[in-house]
Amino acid sequence: MQRIGVFVCHCGSNIAGTVDVKRVVEAIRTEPGVIHAEDYPYMCSEAGQQLIAKAIEEHKLTGIVVCSCSPRMHEATFRKAAANAGINSFMVEIANIREHCSWIHKDVEEGTEKAVILARAAIAKLNLDTPLQPGESRVVKRALVIGGGIAGIQSALDIADAGYEVDIVEKTPSIGGRMSQLDKTFPTLDCSACILTPKMVEAAAHEKINIYTYSEVEKVSGFVGDFKVDIRKKARYVDSTKCTGCGLCQEKCPSKKAPSEFNRGLNTRSAIYTPFAQAIPNVPVIDTENCLKFKTGKCGICQKICAAGAVDYEQQDEIITREYGAIVVATGFDTIKLDKYDEYAYSQSKDVVTSLELERIMNAAGPTKGHLERLSDGKAPKNIVFIQCVGSRCSDGRGKSYCSKICCMYTAKHAMLIRDKYPDTNVTVFYIDVRTPGKNFDEFYRRAVEDYHVNYVKGQVGKVMPQPDGSLLVQGVDLIDNKQIKMNADMVVLATAIEPDPSVRNIATMLTASIDTNNFLTESHAKLRPVESPTAGVFLSGVCQGPKDIPETVAQAGAAAVKAIGLLAKDKLTTNPCTAQADILLCNGCSTCANVCPYGAISYENIQINDHGIREERRVAVVNNALCQGCGACTVACPSGAMDLQGFSNRQILAEVDAICR
Amino acid sequence: MHANNQAEKIKEISGVNPYKCMKCGKCSASCPSYNEMDIKPHQFVSYVINDDVEALVESKSLWKCLSCFACVERCPRNVEPGKLVDAARQLVVRQRGMDYLQADEIPELLDSELPQQLLVSAFRKYKR
C-alpha cells in the first residue's frame, strides 16, 4: 500500500478563483492511500517545495500528488523536489486543475467538483505507480550535415569550431548550393560569390570538417546521439586524390551538348565537368549520360590527356557507413516548375525567364558573360517586365499557398541593377503587395522607385503573348488607376515561387522527421523550438524549414548548430523510462505495433518461451527503449494486450477512468 | 428585396466566397472585355462584400462579360469573379421572368462556326 501525500496549489487566484481549494483537500483526505493533504498559495515556490519535502519526511510518504498547473509547466520541478526528499521521481503525479479546470470554468461549484475528480484520478494512478529508473545512452561526438549550401556550410563551420567533427553530404559535385548561383545579394548588393567562396574554402580547409560531394544519404538507422548512416558516394570517374584540377579534360571533351545545371540549362557544358569555376572540390565528374566513352565505348580523350592519370572509367559507387550523434538537415530549395502557368508563355519564349535564370544572365560567369541580353536573339532588351508572385500565394492548386518571402527583395534588386547598368532600359514591376520587412529592406525597395524610377504597378499580369516581331505583348492591370494595360516588352522575368528541394521527402522519411503539406520540415514548436525537428537529434537549417533569405538562413544555421553542439557536448543521454514493453507471454508477433510505431522503435526477435510447461520458439516484439518516445500508440493497437507503457500502464489508465466515473 | 439578402443570393447562386480575394487583380488583367465594363471584374468582389448589389444589377458589365471564364481559370485564390457576374445576371434574368432567346429560335440562328458556349451565354444575357 502506498503512503500518499496530496498538495493542492492555489496558484494565487489562478486556481483558487474558481476552485475551492480547502474543499478539495477535505474531499480527498479519505481516498485510499492518502496519508496527508494540504494546500498552499504557490506550491512551485521554494517554500512550497520545502513544505512537500517536510511532509515526505514526516509522514514517510511513498508518493505525492500535486494538484496544480499543467505537467508541462512544473512536473519536472516537483519530480526534482521529490527526488531530493528521497522518493523516486516517477512516484509523482500531477492533477492539472488549472488549464484543464479553473481556467475553463466560471462556476466555483463546477470547478471544485472537477478538481476533486481530477485529484482522485491522479491518486488512483499513483496507487499503481512503481519506481522507474531512467536509462542512459551514448552520444557519438560527430555531426552529419545534409546539404552543402550556405545553410549546411554555416552549420558545419559552427559545429566544427566548437571542436566536434562534422561530415557534410552534398548531392551535387560541389558545395555552394543556390547561393553560388546568385549574382548580387540584397540589400547591400555585394557579390554573392565574393562572400560565399571564403566560407566554402574555410569549410573545405577545416580540420574537423569532412565533405562528401556527389554523395547522398541512403539509409539512416539508430536514434538521438547514436545514428548510423549509409552514404552513397557516387562514382565521379575521376580520382580526387590524383586530380590537380587543371581543367584540360573539360576543355578537350568532345561532348559539349549537356545542359548546364549550374546555369539553369541556359547554356551547355562538357560531359566531364565541374559545375562552376570556384567549385569545391575542384575535381570534375563524368556525366555518364552524355559521355561518349560511356555511351559508345569510343573516345577516352580525357583519360589520354590527363597528366595526373586521374580519370578512371572503372570507378564504382561506394557506400560509407558512419555514426553520428546529431543530424542537421539543410537541403534547401528549388524554383517550382511553371508548366501550369501557360499564360506567361514561359515555355513558348526564350525571353520569358525565371528570376534565378536572370541571376545567371546578370552574372559574369553566366551564359551571356554578364551582359543583359535576350536569349532568343542576343539583343539588349529595352523594356523589361517583372511579374511578382508567380506560383506564390496561389491556393488554386496550381502553385503554392505561401509567400516565398524573398521575391519582393530580389526583384527590387534586379530592377535597380538593370536601371543602374542600362539606364535607357524601362523596367516595370507588376506586384500584388510589396513585402519588405527586414533591416534596410524597405529603404532598398524605395530606392528602386525613388532613385532608379522603376515603374511599380499594383496589379497582376493576365497574359504574355509572343508577337511575330519577337517582342512580348504583356496584358496586365493597374488597380490604382483602374486601367487595363497592354505593353510591349523585350523580356519578361517571373518571380517564381520556391519550394523545398524534392530530395527532402526521401530524407525526411529516412529520418522519421515530419514534413508539412508543402514539404517543409516541421519544427518541434513553431515559436519556442524553431530549429529542432520533433524527432530527437534532428535539427533544421535554412529553407528546408520555410522560405527565408540569406541572413535568416545563416542565423538559423547557427542556431541549429548550437542545438547540435548542446547535444554533442553531453557524454550520456538520459532516456525516458516511460517506454513500452511487450509481455512476451501475450505477444503473438503480429507486427501491428511495429506498423503503428512512428519512431521505428519496435523490432522482432525469435525467442525460446516456456509457457506453462510448453517450450516453443516464438516471434515476439522487442522495444528499443532509446528510440521509444512513450506515445502509447502500440499499447492501443496491440490486439492481445501484450504492449504496456511503463508509468502509464493499462491498469493505471483504467484506474483513473474508474476514479473519474465513481 | 433587402440589399443584404441580394448579396447573400449572389453568393448562394455563384457558390463564391468573396472573402478569399487577395486583391491581386489577375481577373481584370485577364479580362478581354475590361475596357467595355463600367464595374471591373475585380470590383465585383468588393461590391458583393459591401452589399452593393444594386449597382451591380444596374451595371452594363453584366452584359459585356463574354463568359470566357479566363478570370475563373486564372484566379489564384479560387474566388472566381466570373461566377459573381453570372450570378448577378441570374438575379436580373430571374426577376424578369424569362429568357430573351427562345429555345425554338435556336436552330435558325445556329451557325457551325458559333461556339456553343456563346449560345448558352446569349440565353442568359441578351434580355435587355
Image (cartoon, coloured by chain):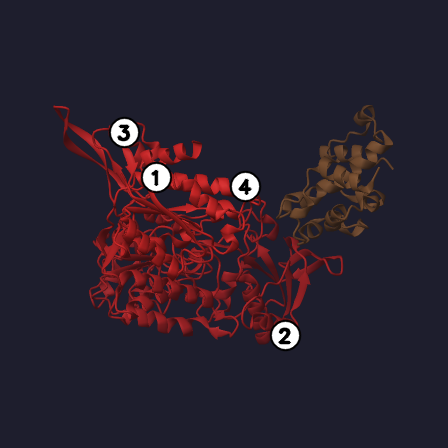
Chain colours: A red, B brown
Is disc 4 placed on a helix, strand or loop?
A: helix
What's the amino acid at mark 3? Cys
Say if labels 3 and 4 share a chain: yes
Residue A396 sits in quarter: top right
Q: Residue at x 42, y 56 (%)?
A: A544
Real-space Cα distance between discs 1 and 4? 25 Å
| Residue at (45, 41) in percent of width and height | A116
The residue that mark 1 highlights is: A125
Tag 4, which chain?
A
Quick one: quadrant of the C terminus of chain A?
Answer: top left
Dot in front, 1 or 3: 1
* Residue bearing mark 3: A590
Label 3–label 4 contact, CB within 8 A: no
Residues under labels 1 and 3: Cα distance?
Answer: 30 Å
Q: Is residue A454 left or right of residue A601?
A: right
Q: CA distance from mark 1 to mark 2?
A: 72 Å
The reply, left or right, for residue A456 in relation to residue A236 is right
Image coordinates for residue A23, horizontal then vertical, percent: 47, 44
| Side (left or right) of B88 relative to A372 | right
Earlier sequence position, callout 3 versus callout 4: 4
Labels 3 and 2 within one chain: yes
Which residue is rendered at x = 30% and y = 50% of the image? A295
* Quadrant where the image shows the N terminus of chain A: top left
Q: Chain of mark 2?
A: A
x, y (%) of residue B60? 83, 45
Q: Considering only vertical position in the picture, is A168 above or below A611? A: below
Residue bearing mark 4: A109
Q: Earlier in the sequence, mark 1 or mark 3?
A: 1
Mark 2 or mark 4: whose residue is earlier in sequence:
4
